[in-house]
Image: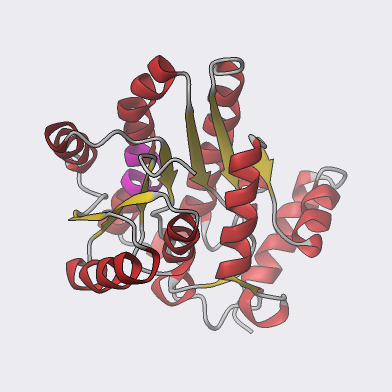
C-alpha cells in the first residue's frame, strides 16, 4: 500500500477507534489520532510507530467543543498532512430517563455525536473529492434503526449519523470518495461504563461483540465502498425484524431491553 496515505481517527485512544488505528498501521497507513487523553495517545504513538514503522501524529482535543473540528483541520493544513481516510468514531451515550438527564451532558453528546462529525466531514471532504479518492467511515450503532427509551438522545444522534451518511454517500457516487456507516450492536469498549450501562439488560442478556472484530469488519466494508455495515448475525437479524413490527411494539421491546437487569 502507498505509504503516503493517511487515516485520521477520532476517539482513537480505546475501543473501536484504537483497534482501527492498529488495523490501519498493519496495512502501512500513516495515522492522525485524535482523543481527549494525550497521555494515552502518546503511548499508542510509541507502540504503533515501533511495531509497524508508520508515522503517527497525535492531537489532543475535546471534540465536544464547538471549535475543535476547525482546530484539527487547521493543524493538518499547517502540517501539510493530507487526509485520505476520515474515521469519525468518537461518541458517547448516557443511560436513564430523559427528564432526569443532565442538560450539559446532552449538549456535549449532540455536539460530539452529530455536529463535530458533520463538521469534520465538511472540512476534509473537498480535498478528497478534488483528488478523486477518499474513504469516510462514520461510526453509528444499531441504535440508529429505532427509538431508544432510557437512552433517547443517544439513539437519536445515531439515527442522524445513519441518515447523514447514507445521504452523502449517494451524492458522492462516481466521485472516487465513498462513505460507509458502521452500525455495531453492543461492543466491549469503555462505552458501557461511560453510559452507565453495566446494569442494563442490553449488556447482560445479549452477545457483546469484541471491538477488534467490529473494527476489522468496518475497515473491510469501508475499503470495499459498502454503504451500511451491521456486524454480527444477531444484530443484522434484529434490525431486519424491526422493519416488520409496529412502532409501538418496537418502543416497548427496546424499553424492556434497556431496563436494569
Residue displayed at 39% across by 65% down: 52
Residue displayed at 34% across by 62% down: 53
Q: Magenta stretch: residue 112 in it? A: yes
In the image, 60: left or right of 159?
A: left
In the image, 243: left or right of 114?
A: right
Asked if one can make out residue 57 in the rendered structure from this viewpoint, the answer is: yes
20 w.r.t. 173: above or below: below
Name the dominant secondary structure of the magenta segment. Answer: helix
Which percent across, then down, holds residue 28?
A: 44, 53
86 w.r.t. 249: above or below: above
Which percent across, then down, holds residue 234?
A: 80, 64
Asked whether 219 or 149 is in front, the reply is 219
79 w.r.t. 260: above or below: above
In the image, 163: left or right of 87?
A: right
Residue displayed at 72% across by 80% down: 205
Q: Magenta stretch: residue 69 in it? A: no
- Range of magenta residues: 110-116
Quarter of the figure with the C terminus: bottom right
Amino acid at each position: 500500500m502507498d505509504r503516503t496515505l493517511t487515516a485520521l481517527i477520532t476517539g482513537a485512544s480505546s475501543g473501536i477507534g484504537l483497534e482501527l488505528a492498529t488495523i490501519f498501521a498493519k496495512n502501512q497507513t500513516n495515522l492522525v489520532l485524535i482523543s481527549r487523553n494525550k497521555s494515552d495517545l502518546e503511548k499508542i504513538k510509541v507502540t504503533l510507530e515501533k511495531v509497524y514503522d508508520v508515522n503517527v501524529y497525535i492531537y489532543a482535543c475535546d471534540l465536544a467543543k464547538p471549535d475543535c473540528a476547525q482546530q484539527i483541520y487547521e493543524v493538518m493544513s499547517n502540517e501539510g498532512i493530507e487526509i485520505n481516510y476520515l474515521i469519525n468514531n468518537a461518541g458517547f451515550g448516557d443511560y436513564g430517563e430523559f427528564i432526569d438527564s443532565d442538560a450539559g451532558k446532552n449538549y456535549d453528546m449532540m455536539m460530539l455525536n452529530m455536529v463535530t462529525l458533520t463538521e469534520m466531514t465538511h472540512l476534509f471532504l473537498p480535498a478528497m473529492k478534488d483528488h478523486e479518492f477518499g474513504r469516510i467511515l462514520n461510526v453509528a450503532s444499531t441504535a440508529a434503526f429505532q427509538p431508544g427509551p432510557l437512552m433517547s438522545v443517544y439513539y437519536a444522534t445515531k439515527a442522524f449519523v445513519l441518515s447523514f451518511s447514507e445521504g452523502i454517500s449517494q451524492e458522492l457516487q462516481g466521485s472516487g470518495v465513498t462513505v460507509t456507516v458502521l452500525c455495531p450492536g453492543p461492543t466491549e469498549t469503555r462505552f458501557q461504563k461511560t453510559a452507565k450501562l453495566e446494569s442494563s439488560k442490553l449488556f447482560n442478556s445479549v452477545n457483546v461483540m469484541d471491538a477488534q472484530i467490529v473494527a476489522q469488519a468496518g475497515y473491510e466494508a469501508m475499503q470495499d465502498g459498502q454503504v451500511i455495515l451491521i456486524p454480527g448475525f444477531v444484530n443484522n437479524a434484529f434490525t431486519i425484524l424491526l422493519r416488520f413490527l409496529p412502532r409501538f411494539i418496537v418502543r416497548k421491546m427496546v424499553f424492556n431491553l434497556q431496563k436494569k437487569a
